[in-house]
Amino acid sequence: MGKQWVRQQIRHDEMHDVVDKGLLWIEKNRQTAAMGAGAIVVVAIILVATFSHARNARAQAWDRLSLAQSYAYSGVPQAALAQLDQLRRDHPNSDAAGFATVFAGDVHFQRAEYKEAADEYSKIIERGLPKGLQPVALADLAITQESAGQAQQAAQTAQRFLDAFPDHYLAPQVHACLARSLLAAGQKDQAKAAFQKISLQYPDTSWAAWAQSQLKSS
């Protein structure tokens, strides 16, 4: 649900970006555009054609992503990965390609292919784009490292997430990852402090109840 909301927001922002660029062109070329109604019509046609082409290309990218997701949810991961790779080849700089990269990581994660999953998430983190996926990729990387038994790396990645995105909706989940990873790394005092912070920072939630149970059993 979270990734879907981010995707919708990015598509909304893309439309505004194209319109803003068109208005900026008109503003910079006001004298040329003011030469006559014909010139203004030509500018309008160019803007509409440009937006239509860009929109169609983006739609194709999102459609391929949806197809890849359908394959994955139907239990055909190899076909899903093939579609995701094709999307990224055809539309390498699109936001849909960013989502494809994160989803490829998800597919690998579900298959316990943790190195491949971590590699995919790291691509988004290194690029920093799309911005809305940065915290998602960082959270996914922390959990992937934890699942791979890389407790120290997972703790570092989780802390990096919490330092950068303390109010993100994934923060409780990543905080739990941090606490578990610290415990697995043998850093019991730091883990205890993390459990205490979870119970205080997310009161009246299942995360707080879980953290309190961990404190009692430690």
Image (cartoon, helix red, strand yellow):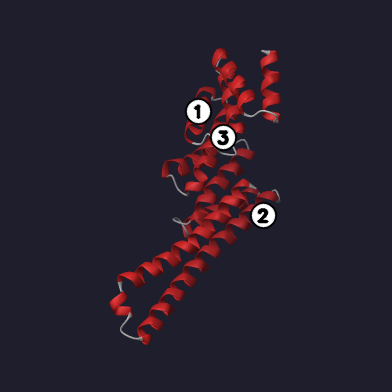
Q: Is residue 215 left or right of residue 168?
A: right
In which quadrant of the rendered view does residue 20 lie?
bottom left
Q: Amino acid at mark 1?
A: Gln
Label 1 vs label 3: CA separation? 20 Å
Residue 74 position, x and y percent, is 71, 51
* Residue of label 3: 114
The residue positioned 51% from the left and 31% from the top of the image is: 162
Q: Looking at the picture, how far across and down is residue 66, in whole percent?
A: 62, 57
Going from N to C along the chain, the mark reached first, 1 or 3, is 3
| Three-letter code for the amino acid on which mark 3 is drawn | Tyr
Q: Which mark is residue 159?
A: 1
Task: Identify the residue at image location x=30%, y=84%.
Answer: 35
| Location of residue 107 in the rendering, given as x and y in whole percent from the top left corner | 61, 44
In front: label 1 or label 2: 1
Q: Is residue 204 left or right of residue 79?
A: right
Labelled disc at residue 24: none
Looking at the image, residue 206 lies above or below residue 184:
below
Identify the residue under disc 2. Answer: 70
Q: Between 23 and 98, which is closer to the camera in this rendering?
A: 23
| Three-letter code for the amino acid on which mark 2 is drawn | Ser
